Amino acid sequence: MEDIKEKKQEIREQMASRLDAIPRETLVGKNHVVVEKLFDFANFLEAKIVLLYLNKDWEIESKSIIDRALEMRKIVVLPFISRDKPKVALYKIDQPDKDIILDPDGISAPDTGRCKKVPIDCIDIAIVPGLAFDEKGGRIGSGEGYYDHLIPRLPITTRKVAVALEEQVISMVPMESHDKYVDIIITDNRVIYKI
């Protein structure tokens, strides 16, 4: 178990270095390609209620995805992550400039006082962030386990889709029993279907 945790941390560090080495202009271009592929993806186009995320370093930039999804009149839902305990609640946002605030830790989050809570069983498609993935849908996130708690609570019919750069796809992600897989990975080079 400790070996897997150490291996994951090693992969996180290697991935951060790999992504840091990509020139900024190239990174922006690759991000753009991934976002365009997402907006051409049939499951995304058909979805009415979309779970998105607020990106951290090395994750596909999410602001443009949120803005375009709202322009398409999709219901956009963002996770609110409680740092006290591994708990995630979902909130609908309508106006990103007003509905997204900085939490006490300085991390962007939906304003729980302003936004409406959304039941998890309403989500049509979940766009899942991560740092590294494999072709079987294995995923390494930030290490806090929030999405490992969230993914199994989503309805079985909800597509769990990761967006990533091709450089973030590795040969094998070491998985523990509590780790959860995604169904599909959209990169700047291809769409990988695990299902």
Image (cartoon, rainbow, N blue to C red):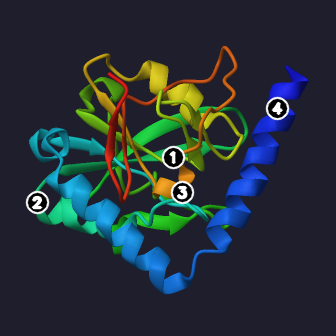
Q: Is residue 64 left or right of residue 70?
A: right
Q: Is residue 109 left or right of residue 63?
A: right
> Residue at 59% across / 37% down in the picture?
171
The residue that disc 3 covers is 167
Looking at the image, residue 189 sits to the left or right of residue 111; the answer is: left
Tag 3–tag 4 contact (CB < 8 Å): no
Residue 192, quarter of picture: top left
Is residue 21 something that shows in the picture? yes
159 or 165: nearer the viewer: 165
Instruction: Tell me the distance, in whole angstroms, between the alpha carbons under discs 3 and 4.
Output: 21 Å
N-terminal label among 3 and 4: 4
Location of residue 85 in the rendering, given as x and y in whole percent from the top left corner: 70, 33
Give the residue at mark 4: 5
Residue matched to label 1: 80
Residue 106 in percent (x, y) is at 66, 67
The residues tagged by marks 2 and 1 sit, at their Cα atoms, a distance apart of 23 Å
Residue drawn where x is 24% and y is 57% of the image: 37
**Residue type beneath disc 1:** Phe
Secondary structure, mark 1, is strand
Of labels 2 and 4, the one closer to you: 4
Q: Residues within 10 Å of mark 2 (few under 14, many from 20)?
A: few
Tell me which label, 3 or 1, sits earlier in the chain: 1
